[in-house]
Amino acid sequence: MRILFTALFLALPLGAMAQDVPSQVRPSQDRPAEDRPIQDGQDDRSAIILPAPDSLPPPEPLPVPQTDPRQQQLERAPDTQPDVQIDIAGEDIVPEAIAPDYSKLSPSAERTARLDDLFIKLAETEDEQSANLVAEEIYAIWTESGSASVNLLLRRGSDAEAKGQPQLARIMYNHTVDLAPEFAEGWARSARLALTQKKYNRALNESLKTLALEPRHFYTLWTMGNVLEVLNRPEEALEAYREANALYPELKAVKDRLAELDAEVNGTAF
């Protein structure tokens, strides 16, 4: 992974890297030209330095994982029935003696420990449905910024994307990364949106930022692989897909594209 990051940073144009360093809240006038409001008479020119070849369409991005925590509350009917004893013999219940104990950890240490345990489970799970459930638990941790305001902005951006409102989504994600530049999921969603808008340099830069904050972000590794394919860098795309597949072997989109691209690049089946 470090080799991949180093190669990508060296390959990026200096100007593109400089405009995307988020060490603090970024004033609106310092945003890339692609994010500023278009004035009357002004051309809508993107600040992309590395043009994508027209002959290579971008791979289909994964659907945006939804972050809306609102769930329908089930109203409980009056308890008019007598208590019923339920036989749970044979159920797959983890005894408390061997269940992970996070109670004595700090919030940051607990987050890391939970993710470590979930990623072990994700790598070992051999059926897609069960793996997806584990991935949902990981997403639930990733999308919690620790700030209600930032969580709301991220959720509104995700909702806007799902409704086909990319301009609104861009505004929400810009606010998200401005308010919480250390929040990896904000950069991950922004990178994915940049990919769908064909702003490939931005997508690549923000994918690298995400992975610097959360190196195991398999969704962003998929996004980065998509971008690298569009930029005609298939070997680096293959490396990104391999990293994602190692973390989440049952992610079908990655597994399928990895096999296809490996056959194209190396002439071998994955």
Image (cartoon, rainbow, N blue to C red):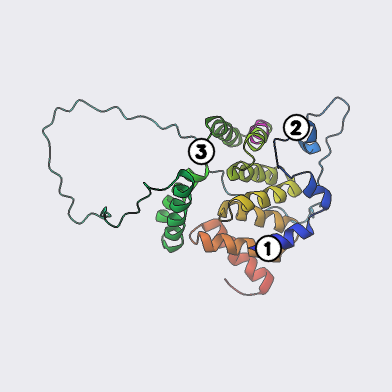
Q: Which residue is mark 1?
A: 4
The residue under the point 32% across, 30% down is: 74
Task: State which region is magenta.
Answer: 168-173
**Quarter of the rendering containing residue 184:** top right
Circle 3: residue type: Thr
**Quarter of the rendering containing residue 75:** top left
Q: Earlier in the sequence, mark 3 or mark 1?
A: 1
Query: Can residue 110 be seen from the camera position used here?
Result: yes
Near mark 1 (Cα within 10 A), the count class, few <14, some 14-19 or many ≥20, is few
Is residue 172 covered in magenta? yes
Determine whether 50 is above or below 74 in the image. below
| In the image, farthest residue toward the right | 41
Q: Which residue is mark 3?
A: 67
Which-is-in-front pick, marks 3 and 1?
Answer: 1
Q: Earlier in the sequence, mark 1 or mark 2?
A: 1
Which-is-in-front pick, marks 3 and 2?
Answer: 2
Query: Where is the C terminus found, in terms of image quarters?
Result: bottom right
Instruction: Provide the secondary structure element on which disc 3 rests.
Output: loop
